[in-house]
Image: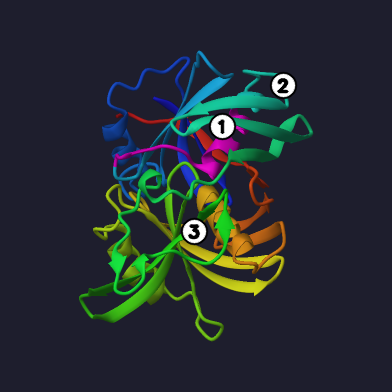
């Protein structure tokens, strides 16, 4: 199987041209190629396929073989792949995903795509559609957070988790979907985004019973009205260096809470993503798309 290894701000996937390659068991292949010791190494597998409703179709699988609906970093790299390999000559393309058709603007330098701007669509605030099982809080009814979006309050409630060698801790999660579910957690001004926080409590929150499809967990430290720092524990992949839908979700919640302006830079371990969000509208994400290498692998 021929492949390209690409990344968007460090969020790396294995890309396969489904126009010429046939991957019979993509969930199984995703686990093989994602292994960083016995495979190629990556956060998952992305197939670039024909579409009846868009220019191209993206099918993605996480490192554990589970299928994902959407990935903002991966879709930028899809745009780079199809343009750089001359599968299209357009700098504005559409890509079909399980969370709908996405519109992408490609930025080209020297004949190659270096970055892209993606219309991520509108955030979803309805608990059942995220999905989130909202607990009934004593004396409060269902948990709801501050701020309004599309006429809906951001779903917000406390969750207590405790693990081996980890003390019990209660987090206020603020949930939104950007094509896949996210739980945003803001840390205090004096707290850092540590490994214990992300790697210790992240997997406990990911699989909490409040999230029937599991959830992506973002730990966020506000810097100022134009900047947020974030680490993410992704469902099915563990901590990744970047998450485009996660950065979008964080920016949406921060904006609705009045913490940031309409344009914000989200600083991740792998780089910076710029998010534009005006309440009631779509979210736009701009970030890099980088090829690492290409090759062949027996699977």
Nearer to me, 127 or 198? 127
Note whether 178 is above or below 140 in the view shown. above
Q: Quadrant of residue 33 in the image?
A: top left
Nearer to me, 218 or 231? 218
39 sits to left or right of 93: left
Q: Earlier in the sequence, mark 3 or mark 2?
A: 2
Few, some or many residues within 10 Å of mark 2 (<14, 14–19, 20+): few
> Where does residue 55 sit, x and y in percent of width and height?
59, 19
Location of mark 3 (residue) = 154
At 42% from the left and 37% from the top, the residue drawn is 69
At 27% from the left and 50% from the top, the residue drawn is 212
Residue 264 is a magenta residue: no
> Where does residue 191 sit, x and y in percent of width and height?
50, 82
Nearer to me, 132 or 64? 132
* Disc 1 secondary structure class: helix
At 43% from the left and 48% from the top, the residue drawn is 126
* Disc 2 secondary structure class: loop
Q: Which residues are magenta?
A: 65-81
Q: Earlier in the sequence, mark 1 or mark 2?
A: 1
Q: CA distance from mark 3 to mark 2?
A: 37 Å
Q: CA distance from mark 1 to mark 3?
A: 31 Å
Which quadrant is home to the N terminus?
A: top left
Residue 71 is a magenta residue: yes
256 sits to left or right of 16: right
Note whether 162 is above or below 256 in the view shown. below
Does residue 214 show up?
yes
Location of mark 1 (residue) = 78
Mark carried by residue 90:
2
Q: Tell us which disc is closer to us: 1 or 3.
A: 3
At 38% from the left and 65% from the top, the residue drawn is 143
Q: Quadrant of residue 80 in the image?
A: top right
């Amino acid at each position: 199987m021929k492949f390209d290894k690409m990344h968007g701000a460090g969020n790396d996937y294995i890309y396969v041209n489904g126009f010429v390659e046939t991957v019979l068991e993509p969930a199984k292949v995703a686990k093989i190629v994602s292994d960083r010791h016995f495979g190629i190494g990556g956060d998952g597998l992305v197939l670039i396929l024909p579409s009846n409703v868009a220019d191209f179709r993206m099918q993605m699988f996480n490192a554990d073989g589970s299928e994902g609906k959407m990935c903002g970093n991966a879709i930028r790299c899809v745009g780079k792949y199809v343009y750089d390999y001359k599968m299209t000559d357009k700098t504005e393309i559409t890509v079909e995903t399980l969370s709908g058709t996405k519109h992408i603007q490609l930025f080209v330098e020297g004949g190659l795509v270096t970055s892209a701007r993606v219309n991520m669509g509108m955030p979803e605030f309805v608990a059942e559609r995220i999905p989130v099982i909202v607990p009934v809080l004593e004396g409060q009814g269902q948990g709801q957070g501050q701020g309004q979006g599309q006429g809906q309050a951001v779903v917000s409630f406390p969750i207590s988790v405790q693990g081996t060698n980890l003390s019990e801790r209660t987090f206020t999660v603020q949930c939104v979907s950007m094509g896949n579910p996210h739980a945003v957690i803001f840390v205090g001004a004096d707290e850092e985004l540590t490994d214990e926080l992300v790697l210790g409590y992240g997997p406990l929150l990911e699989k909490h019973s409040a999230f029937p499809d599991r959830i992506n967990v973002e730990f966020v430290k506000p810097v100022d009205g134009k900047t947020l720092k974030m680490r993410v524990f992704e469902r099915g992949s563990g901590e990744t260096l970047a998450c485009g839908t996660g950065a979008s979700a964080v920016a949406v919640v921060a904006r609705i809470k009045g913490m940031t302006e309409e344009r914000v830079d989200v600083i991740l371990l792998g780089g910076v993503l710029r998010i534009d969000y005006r309440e009631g509208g779509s979210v736009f994400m701009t970030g890099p798309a980088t090829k690492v290498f290409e090759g062949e692998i027996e699977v």
